[in-house]
Each structure stands twice: as structure tokens, then as C-alpha cells.
Image (cartoon, rainbow, N blue to C red):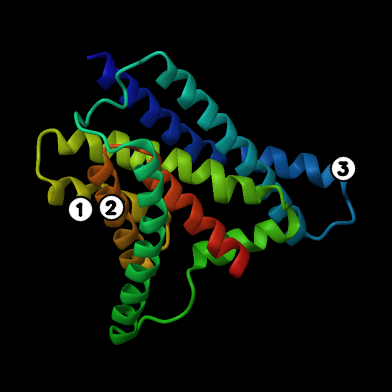
């Protein structure tokens, strides 16, 4: 029961973080506008989004860790766990698997007439140009938090009562939808499936976390 409560608290923390922008972004924008009256609207908007993203993700991650620290069995939903060094290695292998999966997904999108880069990725990279510290939110805080929510909480909870495919499908769709890039939903869903496989394969959440961190870091610094 405590395990389920912790999962619920982590999920609620993530949801509150996602919704908090509706309340906090405008006051933060007004504050920065008062501090920098000569800045353009676009620069102010990017500056506001960058610092909001950094602090909101950091705070949500800290709060989630505090909840998890009180529950010693939170990560015990898999009885068998791969040795830690092998789990780390699988995280690196998983990163390659995600890249391969996204290449295949990109080919499928091309056949369907879908082209262009991800608007979500383009938007985030635009923010890091103005607020470089936001890279930490994209490449570190975000991946860790999302793996706790989408793999441990959603996938992990569903997997206990359903099959891998059902749990992976539902958690991957939620993962894709929460990135608000519906044109490229296939790419996010593929990523979600690979991360769910890695979690099941090793029994350790650190594995998809490593793959996710490597993926976001790779995309950030290559694009």
C-alpha cells in the first residue's frame, strides 16, 4: 500500500509541475520584463520558459526523490535484478537501440508523408540558446523524472496486473502525448517501448534513465 501511495505522490508531483506553468509563467514573464525593459518579446518569452523549466523540473525531481526516500520498497517491483554494472551497460546499449528505433520510425513517417523536425525539440533547443542552464533540465532532470513517472509509476504499476505489451503501449502513449508533439507521436512511442523493454530486461530503473539521458544529451549537442 505504501508503495502505491509513493507512486501516486510522484505522479501527482509531475502533473502539478506540468500544470504550474499556467499559473507561474505570466508573473515570471512580467518580472523579467521589468528587469529587462529593452528585451524583445521573443527573448523575454524564451528567458522565462528556460528558467521556469529549469526550476520546475529541479523542484519536481527533488520532491519526488523525497517521497521515494521514505519508501524502501519503491524500486522492488521486479524481483530479479541484473547486476549493477550490466544494467549500466544495457543503458548504453539502450541508447543505441533508441537511435535505431527512431531511424526506423523516421522512415515510416516519411512513407506516411510526415516530414520536418520535432517542434518540441526545436522549441527546447531555442530555449537553450537563450538560457544555457536549461540544458540540465533537458538532459538530466527531465529524463530522470520522466523515467520515474512513465516507466516506474505508470508502466511498473500496469505491468503488475497486465502483460508487457499492454503496459508498454499505455505508458508509451502517455509518454508521447505529454511531449505535445502529435505529428511525431510514433517516434516518442518507439522511445517509450524501448525504455519499457530496458526496465523489464534489467529490473533497474537506472537503465532506461541512462539511455534517456544519453539520448537527450546527444540530441541537444548535435542539433
Quadrant for the N terminus in the image: top left
**Left or right, 25 with reference to 73:** right
Q: Which residue is mark 3?
A: 35
Question: Which residue is depicted at the point 42% across and 35% down?
Answer: 15
Question: Which residue is depicted at the point 14% across and 47% down?
Answer: 164
Query: Mark 3 against mark 1, which lies toward the viewer?
Result: 1
Q: Quadrant of residue 218?
A: bottom right
| Mark pair 3, 1: CA separation | 46 Å
Question: Which residue is depicted at the point 44% across and 29% down?
Answer: 13
Q: Quadrant of residue 53?
A: top right
Label 3 or label 1, whichever comes before in sequence order: 3
Q: Which residue is mark 1?
A: 169
- Badge 3 crowding class, 10 Å Cα cut-off, few under 14, some 14 to 19, many 20 or more, is few
- Look at the numbered disc 1 and give the secondary structure of its residue: helix
Q: Are marks 1 and 2 in contact (CB under 8 Å)?
A: yes
Label 3 or label 2, whichever comes before in sequence order: 3
Asked if 5 appears above or below 34 in the picture, the reply is above
Disc assigned to residue 172: 2
- Look at the numbered disc 3 and give the secondary structure of its residue: helix
Amino acid at each position: 500500500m505504501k508503495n502505491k501511495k509513493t507512486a501516486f505522490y510522484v505522479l501527482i508531483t509531475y502533473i502539478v509541475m506540468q500544470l504550474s506553468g499556467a499559473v507561474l509563467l505570466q508573473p515570471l514573464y512580467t518580472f523579467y520584463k521589468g528587469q529587462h525593459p529593452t528585451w524583445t518579446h521573443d527573448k523575454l518569452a524564451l528567458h522565462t520558459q528556460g528558467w521556469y523549466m529549469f526550476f520546475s523540473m529541479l523542484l519536481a525531481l527533488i520532491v519526488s526523490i523525497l517521497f521515494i526516500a521514505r519508501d524502501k520498497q519503491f524500486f522492488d517491483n521486479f524481483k530479479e535484478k541484473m547486476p549493477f554494472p550490466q544494467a549500466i551497460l544495457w543503458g548504453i546499449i539502450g541508447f543505441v537501440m533508441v537511435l535505431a528505433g527512431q531511424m526506423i520510425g523516421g522512415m515510416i513517417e516519411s512513407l506516411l508523408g510526415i516530414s520536418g523536425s520535432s517542434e518540441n525539440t526545436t522549441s527546447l533547443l531555442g530555449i537553450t540558446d537563450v538560457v544555457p542552464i536549461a540544458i540540465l533540465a533537458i538532459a538530466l532532470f527531465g529524463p530522470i523524472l520522466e523515467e520515474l513517472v512513465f516507466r516506474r509509476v505508470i508502466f511498473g504499476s500496469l505491468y503488475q496486473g497486465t502483460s508487457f505489451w499492454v503496459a508498454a503501449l499505455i505508458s508509451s502513449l502517455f509518454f508521447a502525448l505529454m511531449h505535445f508533439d502529435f505529428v511525431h507521436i510514433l517516434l516518442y512511442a518507439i522511445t517509450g517501448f524501448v525504455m519499457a523493454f530496458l526496465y523489464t530486461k534489467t529490473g533497474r530503473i537506472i537503465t532506461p534513465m541512462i539511455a534517456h539521458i544519453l539520448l537527450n544529451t546527444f540530441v541537444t549537442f548535435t542539433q
